[in-house]
Image (spheres, coloured by chain):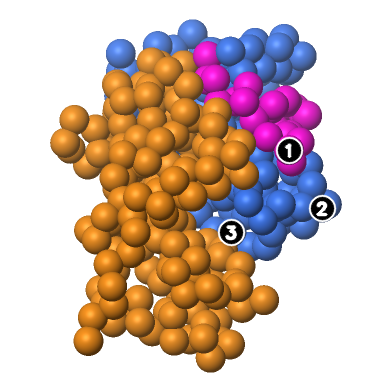
Chain colours: A blue, B orange
């Protein structure tokens, strides 16, 4: 038995409001959702509001965009399953691979089905749940930065 | 023989312009330099522009403030010694320790004298130089997030 396909368009509209209205820095970065589908999510930003003094992308902007791309996926799982939990990010490893001189994206793929099912089942049982995600910054098709992050959901 | 004490007040004025005018996200975060002295640097921000959907500080804002606090120190070394080099951040480890519900700061201490001297000497000899720094986010006196970062300066 497979779950019905989520309404990605409605999810993207809702998520976009959260990312830019409830998180002011998302708006300052001029963030938009370039893709949300069964493969994952892609967030996009122009360079200008995210530039540094060298004319390349500010590391903090790349980190922020990856953190938000990763966070979006468990946040959507909570919403789909009507779960009340606080999502937090714990320890993560951040790598800056090469400089970015134009608009860039942060992409994050959905984890394996088993990890998703366990995440949801733990929360449904009132337990803390974890999800490991690895969003990346893409610039002109190349990986410019990576994040290995663990997100925890704490039932309210 | 000791070097004369740098003019921290003039340095802070110059650095503040870089952090908020040349890095637009610094301005969006309403960043200010709360302290620059022989001990290190403290950058401060209000919560409002850096908040997330839960009413606490957005992880990306904390990461950005720590990256900038760390970056400021080698940037000042380049300026003091008239060195032309590009400063980049490579791999780093980021830890979020506890949530932040108000104005917060990122603090970074100067590294040991020997590490500073080696950094400057390498650049003066035209070689790539590295500096390891560990900025932290402080909230009401407690450590709320930490960053272990390696900055590299590439001679131009």
Which one is in front in this view, the residue at disc 2 or the one at disc 3? Answer: 3
Quarter assignment of residue A100: bottom right
Q: Is residue A107 visible?
A: no
Q: Position of residue B80 (x, y in %)?
A: 44, 69
Mark 3 residue element: strand
Alpha-carbon distance for marks 1 and 2? 19 Å
Q: Chain of mark 3?
A: A
Q: Nearer the viewer, mark 1 or mark 2?
A: 1
Q: Which mark is residue B26?
A: none
**In what element is the residue under mark 1?**
helix
Q: CA distance from mark 1 to mark 3?
A: 19 Å
What residue sits right under mark 1 in the picture? A48
CB-based contact (under 8 Å), mark 1 and mark 2:
no
Query: Which sits in the foreground, B40 or B64?
Result: B40
Same chain for the residues at labels 1 and 3, yes or no?
A: yes
Residue B142: give x, y in percent of width and height. Answer: 17, 37
Whether residue A70 is situated above or below residue B134 in the rendered picture: above
For residue A96, the mark is 3
């Amino acid at each position: 038995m497979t779950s019905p396909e989520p309404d990605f368009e409605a999810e993207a509209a809702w998520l976009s409001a959260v990312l830019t209205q409830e998180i002011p820095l998302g708006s300052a970065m001029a963030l938009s959702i370039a893709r949300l589908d069964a493969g994952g999510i892609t967030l996009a930003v122009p360079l200008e509001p995210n530039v540094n003094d060298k004319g390349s992308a500010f590391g903090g902007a790349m980190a922020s965009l990856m953190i938000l791309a990763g966070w979006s996926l468990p946040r959507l799982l909570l919403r789909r399953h009507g779960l009340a939990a606080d999502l937090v990010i714990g320890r993560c490893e951040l790598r800056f691979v090469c400089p970015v001189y134009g608009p860039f994206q942060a992409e994050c793929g959905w984890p394996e089905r088993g990890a998703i099912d366990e995440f949801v089942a733990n929360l449904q049982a009132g337990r803390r749940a974890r999800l490991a995600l690895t969003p990346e910054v893409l610039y002109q098709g190349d990986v410019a930065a990576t994040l290995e992050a663990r997100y925890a959901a704490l039932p309210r």
